[in-house]
Image (spheres, helix red, strand yellow):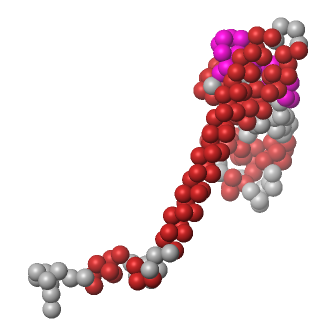
Amino acid sequence: MDKSRILAEIKRIASANGGKAPGMAVFERETGIAYCDWFPHLWLRWGDAVVEAGYAANQFQAAYSKDFLVEKYIALIRELGRIPVKGELLLKSKADKTFPNQKVFYSDGKEGLLKRVIQCHGHAGNEDIASLCIAAAQTAGARSNRKENESRDRLCLFNAVGTSLQNRPHNLRRSPRTSARDQDSRTTDNNSPHRN
């Protein structure tokens, strides 16, 4: 692959994108020039190619602060009049580019997010939000406890079944080397036409 062609393609895409250099995935999708066409013999990092083309390398997006996430979450609660579910967070992030992706809200779990929002009830104007979050946190806590109990019950059942299988008489156990097909072939029907 020719280095000058790759640099020209970066410049072309950047000029069509308002002067912003493309990321690696966008570049490959737009040009068909794959990662293996330039790495490692032309550049070791995509950012090096972008800089050589005359643009600033793209930066990773910094993490949102917890306070920012709480503010956005409270604003959505007020907009909806209730605690949003994941789908509503997803729709909001797609409709409003300033709204974070729904996954970042649950980095500490839903209970952690609700606890942070409840802590903001001392701020003027957040009393209405705190009552909604307290009720939702209690529901989420009960759901979490129920899931833990179900997991523990499944584990107990699994252990009980495993123990009962181990206690079977040896002659009822199938050897690991014997498959069901092998066992079927050894048992023949007396009326079988294939009998010797």
Q: Is residue 107 above or below residue 90?
A: below
Q: Where is residue 161 in the image (x, y as percent from the top left)?
A: 51, 64
Q: In which quarter of the image is residue 8?
A: top right
For the C terminus, give its image quadrant.
bottom left
Give the residue displayed 56% in from the left and 53% down from the top.
154
Give the residue displayed 75% in from the left and 51% down from the top.
3
Q: Does the magenta stretch include residue 179?
A: no
193 sits to left or right of 177: left
104 sits to left or right of 51: left
Q: Where is residue 116 in the image (x, y as percent from the top left)?
A: 82, 26
| Residue 169 showing in the rendered view | yes
Asked whether 83 or 37 is in front, the reply is 83
Q: Where is residue 131 in the image (x, y as percent from the top left)?
A: 75, 15
Q: Is the magenta stretch mostly helix, strand or loop?
A: helix
Q: Is residue 54 above or below residue 85?
A: below
Q: Position of residue 172 (x, y in %)?
A: 40, 79
14 sits to left or right of 51: left
Residue ranking furthest to the right: 123
Q: Does the magenta stretch include residue 83?
A: yes
Give the magenta part as a residue range.
65-84
Give the residue displayed 76% in from the left and 37% down from the top.
107
| Residue 76 showing in the rendered view | no
Give the residue displayed 78% in from the left and 32% down from the top.
112
Residue ranking furthest to the bottom: 196
For the N terminus, give its image quadrant.
bottom right
Asked whether 122 or 166 is in front, the reply is 166
Asked whether 30 or 181 is in front, the reply is 181
Q: In which quarter of the image is residue 86?
A: top right
Q: In this view, does 42 lie above or below 58?
A: below
Picture mark count: 0
